[in-house]
Amino acid sequence: MPGQRKRKRSRERELRRAEAARTPGRWERVFHAPSYAECREYAIRLAGERPELADPALLRFDMFCGRLQHPTTYALSVFVPDPPAAPDCTETPQSPEA
């Protein structure tokens, strides 16, 4: 298909750019359920309670395929940014003189 490689490379570049712009942090699982509908309802409720989660890029849905032995489950994770590093203090604290 003409242009497919160009579109693919463009999407990859955009993804790398977005990853580089994201602040360092981790994904923290907040909810899991056996159905996607339950997970989605929880995400909508969570975004309503916490306005800082209104950006959909801060929420991630994962699907864990259970195959034959375990049922398929869905999980909702929230991106938690790392706290800013404390500035290095070069001065040593002075003890009070008595």
Image: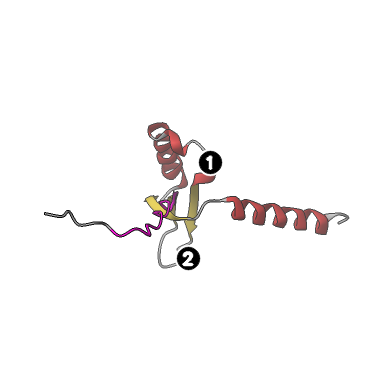
In the rendered image, residue 69 lying in the magenta stretch gets the answer no
Residue 37: percent from the left, percent from the top? Answer: 45, 42
Nearer to us of marks 2 and 1 is 1
Give the residues in magenta.
79-92
Relative placement, left or right, of 67 versus 89 is right
Which comes sooner in the sequence, label 2 or label 1?
Answer: 1
Residue in the image at 43% along x and 38% along y: 41
SS for callout 1: helix
Residue in the image at 46% along x and 46% along y: 36
Residue 62: percent from the left, percent from the top? Answer: 49, 54
Relative placement, left or right, of 7 versus 27 is right
Q: Quadrant of residue 1?
A: bottom right
Amino acid under disc 2: Arg
Q: Main secondary structure of the magenta part?
A: loop
Residue 27: percent from the left, percent from the top? Answer: 44, 55
Residue in the image at 30% along x and 60% along y: 92
Q: Quadrant of residue 52?
A: top left
* Extreme residue toward the left, this view: 98
* Extreme residue toward the right, this view: 2
Please tell me how crowded label 1 is: few (under 14), some (14-19), or many (20+) other residues with Cα within 10 Å.
few
Q: Write down the residue under mark 2.
A: 67
